Image (cartoon, rainbow, N blue to C red):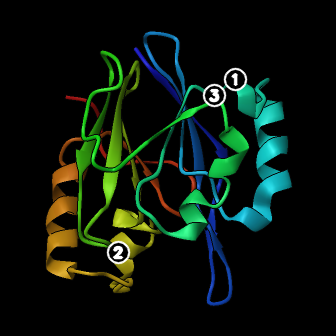
Amino acid sequence: MATVEVIREGYLSERRASSTVTLIRSDDGRRIIVDTGDQRERHTILDALGRVGLTPGDVDLVVNTHRHSDHMGNNGLFNHAVVVEPKDWLRLGEDVQIIYTPGHTLDSYSVLARTDCGTVAIVGDLISLQSDLRSGRVPFSADFALQQENRARVLGTAQYIVPGHNGMFKVRNEG
């Protein structure tokens, strides 16, 4: 089973944004970072990696949920890692998979990780903030109907969600 840890919770305001940065340790031992945050957060990301005992050189793969600078601004920190391109819709080990979830952008992807606690979906701005699910806030979206459809699909699959700009939250109980 994979393990998932939010190493840097993102934020979203009218003036600034930086994505949540998530570490997956896959079942085959690879260390995967999903979204690398805004470039202005470079030192914060380095500190967060240090708190979990890693340096950028320890990361094997980087996955960006979409191509916005607040989600991929620190990709350059991970110059030894393979950056998985969005066209690489694939499985990353037995328990980690990338799926296509357009809506926010037409090149949006989510990462599903099967853990001991159930499936964790790291969704980028498919769900920017947990409160978006109940507040009625309509986020920037290339295709909101498609975004809603993919939200429903992911919410029906996962037990936990890591949104684009918040910490992880529980969706439903296993079984």
The one of 120 and 56 positioned closer to us in this rendering: 56
- Residue, disc 1: 58
Q: Could you tell me residue 101's position as x and y percent?
A: 23, 57
Distance from label 3 to label 2 (Cα)? 35 Å
The amino acid beneath tag 1 is Asp
Q: Determine the residue positioned at 31% across, 81% down.
A: 141
Within 10 Å of the Cα at label 1, are there few (<14), some (14-19), or many (20+) other Cα atoms? some
Question: Which quadrant is the N terminus positioned in?
Answer: top left
Distance from label 1 to label 2 (Cα)? 38 Å
Indicate the quadrant where residue 137 lies.
bottom left
Q: Determine the residue positioned at 45% across, 64% down.
A: 67
Numbered badge on residue 134: 2
**Which one is in front in this view, the residue at disc 1 or the one at disc 2?**
1
Give the structural element (helix, strand or loop) at label 3. loop
| Residue 90 located left or right of residue 45 | left
- Residue, disc 3: 59
Q: Could you tell me residue 118's position as x and y percent?
A: 34, 28
The one of 130 and 63 positioned closer to us in this rendering: 63
Distance from label 3 to label 1 (Cα)? 4 Å
Q: Can residue 47 be seen in this view?
A: yes
As displayed, is residue 174 above or below residue 11? above
Q: Determine the residue positioned at 32% across, 60% down.
A: 108
